[in-house]
Image (cartoon, rainbow, N blue to C red):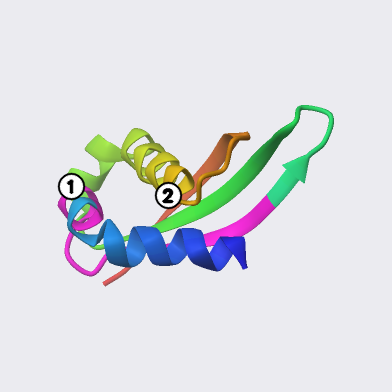
Amino acid sequence: MKKELIEKIINRSLKLTMESYFGDGSYVKVTNLQYIKSKDNYLVSITVYVTDVENSSDFFPDGLEILVSLAWKVLSRNKTIITTSSIEYVN
């Protein structure tokens, strides 16, 4: 459920920012959201599907981490997050 919420926040609420970073029609997919008890934080694995190859390299991975942290704040989670990210190019 939380995975889908993060996706919805980024893909809908932060859509303009995401598309300015990665191109029109770009979107994200959260592949894993896992609580790590030993570190007392969450691991978020996320893939961004980009349409603008040239500009997206300027904003990956930092721009994606910004979007994930903004979505995490909307969810009002007090735990810190670790983000692992990947990028896929779509036409």
Examine the rendering and report whether any part of residue 82 can be seen: yes
Q: Amino acid at mark 2?
A: Val
The C terminus, quarter of image? bottom left
* Mark 1–mark 2 distance (CA, rounded to whole Å): 30 Å
Residue 77 sits above or below residue 16 on the image: above
Residue extending furthest toward the top: 39
Residue 84 is marked as none
Report the residue marked by disc 1. 54
Image marks 1 and 2: residues in contact by CB distance under 8 Å:
no
Taking 15 as reference, is 70 left or right?
right
Tell me the residue at 59%/47% (across/down): 44
Circle 2 Cα neighbour tier, 10 Å, few/some/many (<14 / 14–19 / ≥20): few
Taking 40 as reference, is 21 left or right?
left
Measured from the top left, where is residue 37 in percent x and y?
82, 36
Circle 1 Cα neighbour tier, 10 Å, few/some/many (<14 / 14–19 / ≥20): few
Q: Which type of secondary structure does the marked residue at label 2 adopt?
A: helix
Q: Which type of secondary structure does the marked residue at label 1 adopt?
A: helix
Examine the rendering and report whether any part of residue 29 can be seen: no
Report the residue marked by disc 2. 74
Magenta stretch bounds: 18-33
Q: Amino acid at mark 1?
A: Glu
Is residue 75 part of the magenta span, yes or no?
no
Measured from the top left, where is residue 58 in percent x and y?
23, 36
Counting residues from the start of the chain, the first of labels 1 and 2 encountered is: 1
Tell me the residue at 56%/41% (across/down): 84
Taking 41 as reference, is 10 left or right?
left
Measured from the top left, where is residue 6 in percent x and y?
48, 58
Residue extending furthest toward the right: 38
Q: Nearer the viewer, residue 50 or 15?
A: 15
**Numbered label tally:** 2
Which image quadrant for residue 28?
bottom left
